[in-house]
Image: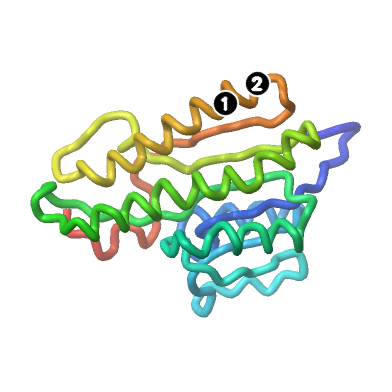
């Protein structure tokens, strides 16, 4: 975003900030001079010692705690104008290989945690008539694949929500985007049996 060759500084909330795409996004935003509030379970191996980086340790899979935790972040940082939802994990296998708990856990983290974040931060953005919510989906949101029923379902849900929110936010000054990358060189694939 440029105005008269000046970059407009943002306050961005990045979910899944300690590794992979989320960490890369944090580094890019910090390099451009934005303030980043990064959410992750653990920053011990991914420290970002930047004055413009605020780490928030939170397990996004613990849905029951998210509304209160997100409200606290919003209270502490009322001017957040970008929310970037990158958190997630991959788990693959035939549907019958998943326990009921594993199905729920994957949907909770890959989809519902992002829905909770959007629900919390969108209203203030709409009132302020500006902001951007970006969901990092997957090419798995575009076509179902063998041994990916639950993972694909979580990404299809994210894509559907992004498309609906884009229409809901039309004319509000709030932008909704989804990016569906393919394979990316990160640790995401290190422990997957696919």
The residue that label 1 is drawn on is 166
Locate residue 122 relative to residue 138 in the image: left or right.
Answer: right
Secondary structure of the residue carrying tag 1 is helix
Per the model, the C-alpha gap separating discs 2 and 1 is 6 Å
The residue closer to the viewer here, 183 or 86, is 86
Q: How is the image coloured?
A: rainbow
Locate residue 27 relative to residue 21 in the image: left or right.
Answer: right
Residue 139's spot in the image, x, y percent?
A: 34, 36
Circle on res. 36: none
Q: Are marks 2 and 1 in contact (CB under 8 Å)?
A: yes
In the image, residue 39 sits, relative to residue 42, either above or below, namely above
Q: Residues within 10 Å of mark 1 (few under 14, many from 20)?
A: some
Q: Residues within 10 Å of mark 2 (few under 14, many from 20)?
A: few
Which residue does the image show at 29% across and 39% down from the upper left?
153
Secondary structure of the residue carrying tag 2 is loop
The residue that label 2 is drawn on is 170
Quarter of the rendering containing residue 189: bottom left
Residue 121's spot in the image, x, y percent?
A: 66, 46
């Amino acid at each position: 975003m440029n105005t008269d060759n000046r970059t407009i500084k943002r306050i961005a909330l990045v979910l899944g900030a300690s590794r992979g795409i989320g960490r890369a996004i944090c580094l890019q935003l910090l390099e451009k001079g934005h303030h980043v509030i990064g959410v992750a379970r653990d920053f011990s191996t991914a420290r970002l010692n930047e004055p413009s980086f605020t780490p928030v340790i939170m397990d996004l899979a613990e849905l029951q705690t998210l509304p209160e935790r997100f409200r606290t972040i919003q209270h502490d940082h009322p001017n957040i104008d970008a929310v970037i939802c990158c958190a997630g994990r991959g788990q693959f296998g035939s549907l019958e290989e998943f326990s009921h708990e594993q199905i729920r856990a994957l949907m909770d983290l890959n989809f519902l945690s992002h829905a909770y974040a959007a629900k919390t931060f969108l209203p203030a953005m709409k009132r302020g008539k500006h902001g951007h919510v970006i969901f990092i989906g997957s090419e798995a949101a575009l076509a179902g694949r063998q041994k990916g029923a639950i993972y694909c379902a979580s990404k299809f849900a994210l894509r559907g929500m992004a498309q609906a929110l884009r229409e809901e936010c039309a004319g509000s000054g709030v932008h909704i985007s989804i990016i569906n990358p393919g394979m990316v060189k990160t640790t995401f694939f290190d422990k997957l049996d696919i």
